[in-house]
Amino acid sequence: MKISFISKMAWQNIKSNRKLYIPYVMAASTTVAMFIMMSALLTNKFVQERSAVLTSLFGMGTIVIGIFSLIFIFYTNSFLMKRRKKELGLYSILGLEKKHVNTILGMETIIAGSISIISGMIIGILFGKMSFLILNYVLSFPVEIEYSIGWNTFGLTIALFIGIFFLTMLFNITQVTFSNPIRLLKGGKEGEKEPKSSPILFVLGLLSLGAGYYISLTIADPMSALTQFFVAVLLVIIGTYLLFTAGSIIVLKLLKKNKKLYYKPGPFISISGMLYRMKQHAVGLANISILSVMVIIAVSTTITLFLGTEETLSTRFPAENKLTMSPPDMSGEELEQNAEVLYDRVEQYTEEQNLQIKDGVKYQSVNLFGNLKENVFNIREIRDADGTMLLLFPLEDFNQMSAEEYNLKEGEALIYNNGSSVDLDSFVIAEQEYNTIPLKKVPQILKSNTQIVDTIIAVLPTVQDIDEVLNYNNQQPDNTDTQWYADYHWNTTGSEAVKKDYATEINGITQADDLEVSGFYESRETSRQEWYSMNGGFLFLGIFLGGLFTIGALLITYFKQVSEGYDDRERIQIMQKVGLDKQTTRQATHSQIVWMFTLPILTAAIHTAFAYPIIHKLLMIFGIMQHKLLILCTVGVVVAFALIYWVIYRITSKVYLSIVE
């Protein structure tokens, strides 16, 4: 057969089945658009410049959307193929060989796939641009976020969806090749066989979901949350699919065995209808559940970040001003002498401006990384989520920060360990053993340092004790040289405008050329606009993604209702012909629709509840330490999305009822 003839027949088939192909191409195009917009955010300049954590999360999101695209296109393709089985069987009866039917079917897939990929990319470009323009205008954040798609994104999108459509083509060809023509002729009207329950898949689903929940509930610290978040997401997705496909069938069969309930007109129609179609439509319900969770998490976390900007600033800046010095190759005493020179200049300028320094705290410290085995801290260079941060302070400086006055003898150390509740009787560092006195709490100024990773705070009697640890570390061949840090935190009097001008001048003073040791200065006031811009950008992205995933959920819901309507229409018409009245039919179908719509939103709410611990740990990286704001935002978004979902339910249920009636 010539290519021109095959192409002509394929086009003719698509035109003849446009009622099936138009929803299919629309669904596939929207999926392509969702993927290209998500992957575009991965390379977005704002995302890459603002946060490596956000880049990692968008990378995970791109992979999840890719997996979702594969499942959803196969799901819509199965609906298309079921409605066309009679037509494909007729070709064989009329004399076309299966290889010719497969060739035509392959060409149809190429045409439909090409239209979907091209139109999807165009929709992704236009919708992304339009959404960014509207959100930039409505939200009016100080920093405008641009939307752009690189050639790498186009290449990735084209390659992925060519692969997906190629797999659907192989699946369709396999169905035709191994099917009897008579069976294909009856395929369009052939009812679904009662699906077999699979306890193994059900158990695997429970284990997968339980493992994902367990990771979230037992996550130790924010850095561990970052590395394990994607694993937990994948486990929950797998568990969701398995429980919807296997678990729902087991539950429905148990309801069927309840004769008092099952043998009533309403429950009979609802339970039998859901049971026979669950094998096919469970995937759609799982897709809606996963997209709903993505909407809730994307929007609630970014709203929390934006509304919690002041908390973030307070966490990052315990005082309004922070000055840090960290010169290499300098002992603790030498750094203290040089730091006092800069401190004096800061205090002198403050006095000249008729301002007062309040709550000033000066201290020196050394930061080391390693792991704690029993009571021995082993210093190492590589930093990862399994390691522990060790903060060393001399006693005199620690007492300045603390509300209490501590005393240490030679060979003693104050120890605080946030990674373990076990009190250490002794502590060994740099081959020197110290008898320990446990610290039950740390000064407020150090709390943010102890909440991101496992941290040990060790207070040693003198600066010289810490110098010995520092020298020991720097002499090890595999360790990076570490230096002392000198920090000065303080507040000042004056208005916000005065504080901004003050911060500008102090920044210049700390960088003066005649200083032997310059400092790195940060101010809460000057950082406020930058943080609001950054968190506003995150809110922008959250709203964009929330809208994107909501459209995806709407599309799947609509497609599922149309396909179910066609599946149920003939069955319900037969029941009405044998005496079932329309009111009973409508009540039964309404009950069925309610369950089909309730399951995804309930599943999404449960997933969100179990995801809360790991989400909170991730937000701690951005400085959100309190639970109240995140809980309020999450509950608010769940309620808002439930209302939107209810509107979607009302609209699409009318579509379903119009088809079946």
Image (cartoon, grey):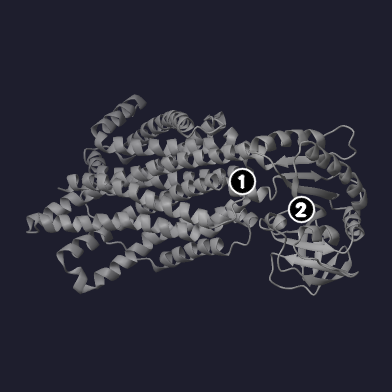
Q: Which residue is mark 2?
A: 382
Q: What residue is disc 1 on?
A: 53
Q: Quadrant of residue 409?
A: bottom right
Count of all numbered marks drawn on residues in the image = 2
**211 or 512: nearer the viewer:** 512
Helix, strand or loop at mark 2: loop
In the depicted structure, whether residue 595 falls above or below residue 641: below
* In this picture, residue 587 sits left or right of residue 35: left
- Left or right: residue 531 versus residue 100 is right
In the rendered view, tell whether residue 413 sits above or below residue 225: below
What separation in Å lies between label 1 and label 2 (alpha carbons)?
19 Å
| Figure check: 588 above or below 151 | below
Tell me: 174 left or right of 48: left
Out of 127 and 39, give the one closest to the viewer.
Answer: 127
| Residue toward you, 630 or 583 | 630
Indicate the secondary structure of the residue bearing disc 1: helix
Spot occupied by residue 177 in the image (x, y as percentages of width and height): 34, 46
Rendered residue at 32%/63% (across/down)? 249
Amino acid carrying label 1: it is Val
Say whether marks 1 and 2 touch (CB < 8 Å): no
Report crowding for label 1: few under 14, some 14 to 19, many 20 or more residues within 10 A (C-alpha).
Answer: some
Labels 1 and 2: the sequence-earlier one: 1
Residue 476 in which image quadrant: bottom right
Q: Position of residue 16 (x, y in %)?
A: 23, 32
**Residue 82 at x, y = what percent?**
28, 46
Mark 2 crowdedness (10 Å alpha carbons): few <14, some 14-19, many ≥20: few
Which mark is in front, 1 or 2? 1
